[in-house]
Image (cartoon, rainbow, N blue to C red):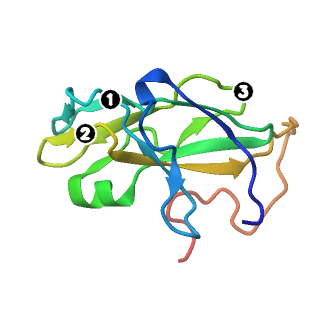
Amino acid sequence: MSGSIQVEVQQLPHGEGLALPAYQSALAAGLDLLAAIPEDKPLVLAPGTYTLVQTGLAIALPPGFEAQVRPRSGLAARHGITVLNAPGTVDADYRGEIFVPLINHGASAFTIRRGERIAQMVIARVAQAELIAVTALTPTARGDGGFGSTGR
């Protein structure tokens, strides 16, 4: 695979036995994250509620990269389950466990079981900006036109 990078991953004790995140197709952008919750204690997410779900993983990203935690489209389309702060960002200097804040926007309770695919993680390049204070910005045709201002 061209353009791939190496990312160290640590499986924490409560994640042992679960598969590592994996791409589900040859050209997939996201690696699936699994719920690392106890087998005998599934999480029930009532409509309108949210919870942090453990993944049992910590990663070491190289400088210049981030991991974005995004919803899985199937969970969103079928059950109204999504990532609360989508996309969540894992910075290159973070070494703690990756948690997924899931929210239930659906009409029915949703049960999360150990090993269930709950989100996807996209590894992306980032650039840090150097902000330069100015008194005016370079003009453009769009100017300060905001929400809904293009395509008219």
Disc 1 target residue: 37
Q: Secondary structure at mark 1?
A: loop
Q: Nearer the viewer, residue 27 or 9?
A: 9
The type of residue carrying mark 2 is Ile
Of callouts 3 and 1, the N-terminal one: 1
Answer left or right for 64 relative to 18: right
How far across and how far down the image is residue 81, in percent? 28, 47
| CB contact under 8 Å: marks 2 and 1 | yes
Answer left or right for 110 relative to 50: left
The type of residue carrying mark 3 is Asp
- Tell me the distance, in whole angstroms, between the alpha carbons under discs 2 and 3: 29 Å
Answer left or right for 98 relative to 95: left
Q: Nearer the viewer, residue 23 or 16?
A: 16
Mark 1 crowd level (few <14, some 14–19, many ≥20, 10 Å Cα):
many
Residue at image location 53% in from the left, 25% down from the top:
97
- Tell me the distance, in whole angstroms, between the alpha carbons under discs 2 and 1: 9 Å
Disc 3 target residue: 93
Disc 2 target residue: 112
Residue at image location 30% in from the left, 37% down from the top:
114
- Tell me the distance, in whole angstroms, between the alpha carbons under discs 3 and 1: 25 Å
Of badges 3 and 1, the one in the foreground is 1
